[in-house]
Image (spheres, rainbow, N blue to C red):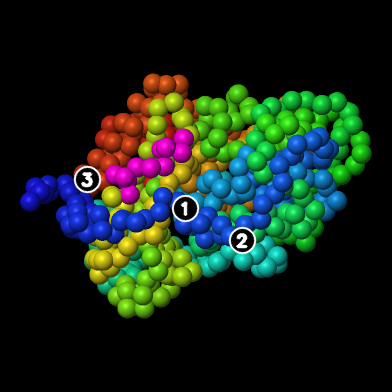
Amino acid sequence: MSRRSAHDTVFERQRPAAAAVEQALAGARRSAFWLDDIALSRTRFETLRHTIDADLVIVGGGYTGLWSALRALERRPDARVVVLEAGRVGWAASGRNGGFCEASITHGDENGESRWPEELQTLRRLGDENLDAIEETVARYGMQCDFERTGTLTVAVEPHQVDWVRGDGFLVAAAVRAEVMSPTYLAGAWNKRSTVLVHPAKLAAELARVVTELGGKIFEGSRVVDLGSVGRGAGRLDSGVSGASGASGGSGGGVASGASVAPGGGVAVRTASGGTVRAAHAILATNVFPSLLKRNRGMTVPVYDYALMTEPLSDAQMASIGWANRQGIADLANQFHYYRLSADNRILFGGYDAVYHFGSKVRPSYEERAASFSTLASHLLTTFPQLLGIRFSNAWAGPIDTSTRFCAFFGTARQNRVAYAAGFTGLGVGASRFAADVVLDLLSGQQTERTQLRMVRERPLPFPPEPAASIGINLTRWSLDRADHRGGRRNLLLRSLDAVGLGFDS
């Protein structure tokens, strides 16, 4: 029998038998459920093997790139927009995340308030407007992506977390358990409008469908290997301001097509498959993968996140946990869990471990981590002991593009011919649409409400080089885990990071 400590969390105090965890994971496929779910229906796009001209070329076929293409085409329907994707559309973070589409563009109010307190109300409003615009876009184009605006149920699972959740929508233990029955819940709060749940791979596929229906071109298997310059002769991006064409989200600099190029010339993007796109402007939407701009290569690090998906719950199992309102759920630990129901009543359960590998490498082998999968399975059975005997169909992982300010940063390069957004730190499902409008505004050369934000104008601190990066990140992770086991008390390292704006608690 294992020894218990006064500092154990509920997941250690009420740990299920190891045999139950092993049985639950037996047979789980090491692949992302969402991508498996659309494998037979996904559209395949051709590989670029020749030279084409465009007004705008976008590097990256995930949410940021696809939203940028969609918004560019809504602003100027006659624009020639090209998206280049190294693999398949939405195959990376955009197709394997938890499907939480949040209103916050600052990774929560606390993070936003600590960095841009004078802008917090504006940032909240812009985030709410962005989420509303996503909902409107999904409806207008008939996007089939299991869209549910159920909000988030935030739960306290340790006594020290109860005070953290007090405020609007506060629920005592009995009330939160009436929503979702877990013996671990001590209190909670339900924000009913702040979160949309989506099928992430379907969302990516539907964005790609709309982009092509609006006239954009998408190329898969077209890894970009060079970002160069080109003289006159390609299309151009207009520097004028135009209203959005039948789209929500306000106006900003638009995209214009034309046979001539602006006096400064344009860009030439070359792919490993032998293709080249010559365009007036480019948007870099590669996020966790190494940037084509050297200045940005130390601005993000890949942190691996892990997730499980259960088999569909039976009617009896659903009755045992309630969850009739189908909220997304997150607990309040530093090493937190997020979980939700799928359209067919599977439970996705992810988070907790956040693993960084020396040298900021992104490798498929890092996605296999048996210890993380066992931990998540154990924690789910602690959360819902009435589901003992359930099995997991899928276990997977993927890297998150983490920045030191824990939300996206933006900028331009090459005399305003290139714009970029990266560093979403796990909240890119919703914030990527906001980022698309920001980068298009920046390319327009016009000042908008978005481009005047300090959040947009300022760059975060870069991560230090190795071995300092690995030492610092892993020591911080250890400190956050220690705080979870010490009533939330943050040690000297965490307090020091808080003081210089690098602290984080979720």
Quarter of the image where one finds residue 260: top right
Which stretch appears magenta? 363-373
Q: x, y percentage for residue 372?
A: 32, 46
Nearest-to-viewer mark from 3 and 1: 1
Count up the numbered dots: 3
- The amino acid on which the numbered mark 1 sits, given as a three-letter code, is Ala
Mark 1 or 2 closer to N-term? 1
User: Left or right: where does residue 266 sit relative to residue 193?
Assistant: right
- The amino acid on which the numbered mark 3 sits, given as a three-letter code, is His
**Label 1 – label 2 distance at C-alpha:** 16 Å
Give the residue displayed 82% in from the left and 26% down from the top.
230
Residue wearing tag 3: 485
Q: Does the magenta-highlighted stretch encompass residue 17?
A: no
Residue wearing tag 2: 41
Please tell me whether mark 2 sits on a helix, a strand or a loop.
loop
The 10 Å Cα crowd at callout 2, few under 14, some 14 to 19, many 20 or more, is few
The 10 Å Cα crowd at callout 1, few under 14, some 14 to 19, many 20 or more, is many
Residue wearing tag 1: 32
Give the residue displayed 62% in from the left and 57% down from the top.
42
- Which of the two residues, 485 or 359, is positioned nearer the viewer here? 359
Q: Which mark is residue 292?
A: none
Question: What secondary structure is the stretch in magenta mostly built from?
Answer: helix
Quarter of the image where one finds residue 275: top right
Nearest-to-viewer mark from 3 and 2: 2
